[in-house]
Image (cartoon, rainbow, N blue to C red):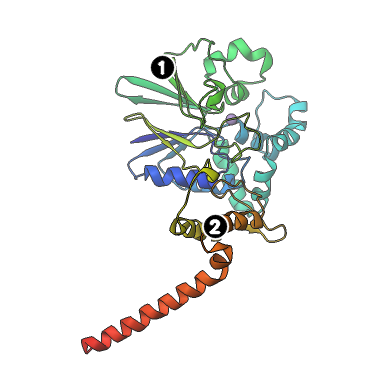
């Protein structure tokens, strides 16, 4: 099977959700069309996972391109001007690259060089044949459009990872283009949450995985990570929790969420989450989450925090005790 996803943007929860659904096998291939990093904090971690998977093929995205220009002394896009290089770091920061830089600085020099070497090696497109159809996989724009836009782009590389092509722009390629980079609501505004966009010889798969969870203003639709299986065009989407207040959860479900909540990394100084959790964006304060559970669980958050553990402890002891009694009864 052949899978395609794009624009993971450091969102580990959404990435895990897709990987669980597709259950990638060694004989499958997963294409990742760039922008693994930036916006959410786990870009480098996801990148290192992808690097270690022999059946993953990745493309350069504009975020990896920005990181190389800003941080890697060995990467040179000869089309760039001195002023572009001078502005490379601020440009990357403005596009939420600082969160990736923090992770990068925690790596040892060998690991860091491996990441840079991998990014330097990434191509700008793949072509995949599936039956009678040829798919061109790209991050942003087909190279064939470069000549018409070169006045505004220094190089082919810069163009093909950055350019957002309007729907009415003729394609100039004889295949079906699959691309990320431009969230699909740009083409189909009313769809919420975002879905894979199928247009004339073009398929857009960036469904806003880099968008914040439950963005405070609803001017933009809800984002999620999408994945397309080319063999049968089946679409996969990361599991999202969009309307927390409209859903009634049982105590049992809430306790399962509570156990997930225990695994969410927390900044010990600010008491704020470092990852998304359910409907709550990262950096939500711990007390807000406690309050949410308190309003929903029949026994309140005090039970979840203290009494439930005691209950589990005593349940386990009862089980052990009855098991021991059972053994005695068997006469063993
Ligand atoms: Mn992009």
Q: Are marks 2 and 1 in contact (CB under 8 Å)?
A: no
Comparing labels 2 and 1, the label whose residue is closer to the camera: 2
- Is 183 or 287 nearer to us in this picture? 287
> Which one is nearer the viewer's eye here, 306 or 171?
306
Which residue is label 1 attached to? Answer: 175
Q: Residue at x 45, y 45 (%)?
A: 17
Task: Provide residue 27's location: percent of width, then percent of height.
Answer: 32, 42
CB of residue at label 1: within 8 Å of ligand 1?
A: no
Residue name at image x 43 percent, y 45 percent:
19
Where on the image, by quarter, is ligand 1? top right
Residue at 59 percent of width and 51 percent of height: 111
- Residue most extreme to the front: 298
Residue displayed at 35% across by 40% down: 28
Instruction: Answer with left or right where residue 131 lies relative to residue 7.
Output: left
Q: Quadrant of residue 295?
A: bottom right
Q: Quadrant of the N terminus?
A: top left
| Horizontal and vertical percent position of residue 63 | 62, 34
Gap between marks 2 and 1 measured at Cα? 45 Å
Q: Specify which label sits upstream in the sequence, 2 or 1.
A: 1
Q: Which mark is residue 244?
A: none
To which residue does mark 2 refer?
A: 261
């Amino acid at each position: 099977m052949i899978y395609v996803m794009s624009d993971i943007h450091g969102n580990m929860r959404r990435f895990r959700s897709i990987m669980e659904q597709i259950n990638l096998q060694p004989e499958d291939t997963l294409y990742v069309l760039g922008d693994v990093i930036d916006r959410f904090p786990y870009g480098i971690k996801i990148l290192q996972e992808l690097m270690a998977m022999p059946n993953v093929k990745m493309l350069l995205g504009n975020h990896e391109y920005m990181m190389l220009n800003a941080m890697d002394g060995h990467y040179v896009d000869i089309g760039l001007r001195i002023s572009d290089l001078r502005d490379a770091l601020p440009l990357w920061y403005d596009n939420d690259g600082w969160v990736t830089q923090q992770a990068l600085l925690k790596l040892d020099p060998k690991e860091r060089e491996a990441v840079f070497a991998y990014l330097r090696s990434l191509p700008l497109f793949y072509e995949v044949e599936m039956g009678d159809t040829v798919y061109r996989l790209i991050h942003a724009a087909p190279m064939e459009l470069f000549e018409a836009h070169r006045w505004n782009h220094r190089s082919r590389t810069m163009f093909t990872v950055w350019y957002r092509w309007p729907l009415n722009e003729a394609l100039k390629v004889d295949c079906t283009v699959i691309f990320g980079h431009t969230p699909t609501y740009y083409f189909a505004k009313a769809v919420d949450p975002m879905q894979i966009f199928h247009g004339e010889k073009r398929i857009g798969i960036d469904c806003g995985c880099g968008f914040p969870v439950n963005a405070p203003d609803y001017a933009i639709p809800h984002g999620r990570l999408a994945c397309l299986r080319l063999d049968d065009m089946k679409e996969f989407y990361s599991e999202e929790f969009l309307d927390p207040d409209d859903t009634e959860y049982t105590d049992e479900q809430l306790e399962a969420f509570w156990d997930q909540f225990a695994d969410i990394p927390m900044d010990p100084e600010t008491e704020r989450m470092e990852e998304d959790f359910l409907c709550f964006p990262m950096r939500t304060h711990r007390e807000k989450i406690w309050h949410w559970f308190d309003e929903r669980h029949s026994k309140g958050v005090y039970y979840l925090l203290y009494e439930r553990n005691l209950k589990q402890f005593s349940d386990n002891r009862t089980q052990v005790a009855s098991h021991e009694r059972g053994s005695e009864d068997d006469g063993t």
